[in-house]
Image: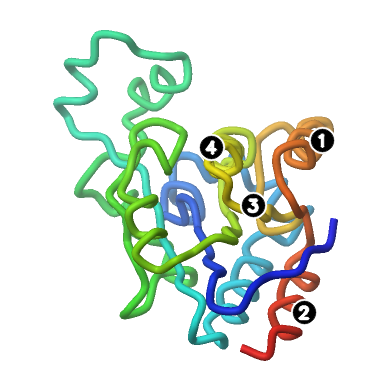
């Protein structure tokens, strides 16, 4: 689904580009690694970020996950997803694991959002406030996990009447090809555009920004 964007109203959200997910020493890396390799996810994210940075009027937003020791110990209702993270102390606040992966880290002037503890970045962080401050209507979302935080945030953004773009190749989820195909079907239902990094960057170049 190619799309036309409006100059000065496009933003890019990058979800959970942290060592836990992207470094080979991260606790979650192994579950994503086969898809990173199959899709070229890390290289594609690098090209996406570099390409967007070439357009000075496109803000870049970084979202992270982080849990404190108190979170691990005191939550009353712990979902299956959170149980997996808590049992393995994933995304532990203040550790190397929740730092941005060096090759995909933010640059000065880019927006680092408050950490999200649930799936929906719009619901759990200051993202909506930041989008409104910058008059962002067209939101492109990339990162991991495609079947959790990316999908949930894309759905929420669509429900709030944003134009939503998601990616075929700047994304990943555990589970191989079967999961990927199901993820793409779902994203096509809730996104206004599901494209490759190359096609997205070409659309931005057409704006002349």
Snapshot colouring: rainbow
Q: Earlier in the sequence, mark 1 or mark 3?
A: 3
Give the mark toward the camera: 4 or 1.
4
Q: Position of residue 189 (x, y in %)?
A: 77, 36
Q: Position of residue 81 (x, y in %)?
A: 47, 21
Q: Position of residue 87 (x, y in %)?
A: 35, 20
Location of residue 41 with respect to 197 vertically, above or below: above
Q: Residue at x 46, y 69 (%)?
A: 60
Give the SS element for disc 1.
Answer: helix
Question: In the rendered image, which residue does mark 1 sit on?
Answer: 185
Q: Residue at x 42, y 14 (%)?
A: 79
Give the mark toward the camera: 1 or 3.
3
Q: Earlier in the sequence, mark 4 or mark 1?
A: 4
Instruction: Report the front residue among 18 and 184.
Output: 184
Q: Measure the alpha-carbon separation of dots 1 and 3.
A: 15 Å
Q: Earlier in the sequence, mark 2 or mark 4?
A: 4
Q: Are marks 1 and 2 in contact (CB under 8 Å)?
A: no
**Residue 202: assigned label:** 2
Question: In the rendered image, which residue does mark 4 sit on?
Answer: 156
Quadrant of the snapshot with the N terminus: bottom right
Give the SS element for disc 4.
Answer: helix
**Position of 105 compared to 53: left or right?**
left
Location of residue 158 with respect to 138 vertically, above or below: above
Location of residue 109 by image quarter: bottom left
Binning the other alpha carbons within 10 Å of mark 4 as few (below 14), some (14 to 19) or many (20 upward) gives some
Give the mark toward the camera: 2 or 3.
3
Give the mark toward the camera: 2 or 4.
4
Q: Measure the alpha-carbon separation of dots 2 and 4.
A: 26 Å
Location of residue 175 with respect to 109 vertically, above or below: above
Question: In the rendered image, which residue does mark 3 sit on?
Answer: 164
Q: Earlier in the sequence, mark 4 or mark 3?
A: 4
């Amino acid at each position: 689904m190619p799309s036309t964007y409006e100059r000065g109203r496009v933003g890019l959200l990058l979800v959970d580009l942290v060592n836990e997910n992207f470094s080979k020493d991260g606790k979650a890396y192994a579950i994503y690694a086969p898809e990173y390799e199959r899709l070229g996810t890390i290289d594609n994210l690098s090209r996406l970020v570099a390409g967007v940075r070439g357009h000075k009027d496109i803000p870049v937003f970084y979202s992270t996950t982080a849990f404190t020791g108190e979170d691990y110990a005191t939550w009353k209702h712990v979902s299956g997803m959170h149980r997996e993270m808590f049992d393995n102390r994933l995304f532990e606040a203040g550790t190397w694991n929740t730092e941005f992966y060096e090759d995909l880290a933010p640059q000065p002037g880019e927006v680092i959002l408050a950490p999200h503890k649930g799936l929906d970045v719009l619901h759990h962080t200051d993202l909506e406030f930041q989008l409104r401050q910058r008059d962002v209507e067209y939101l492109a979302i990339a990162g991991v996990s495609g079947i959790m935080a990316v999908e949930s945030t894309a759905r929420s953004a669509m429900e709030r009447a944003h134009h939503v773009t998601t990616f075929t190749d700047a994304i990943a989820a555990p589970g191989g090809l079967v999961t990927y195909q199901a993820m793409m079907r779902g994203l096509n239902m809730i996104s206004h555009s599901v494209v490759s990094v190359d096609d997205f960057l070409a659309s931005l170049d057409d704006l002349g920004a």
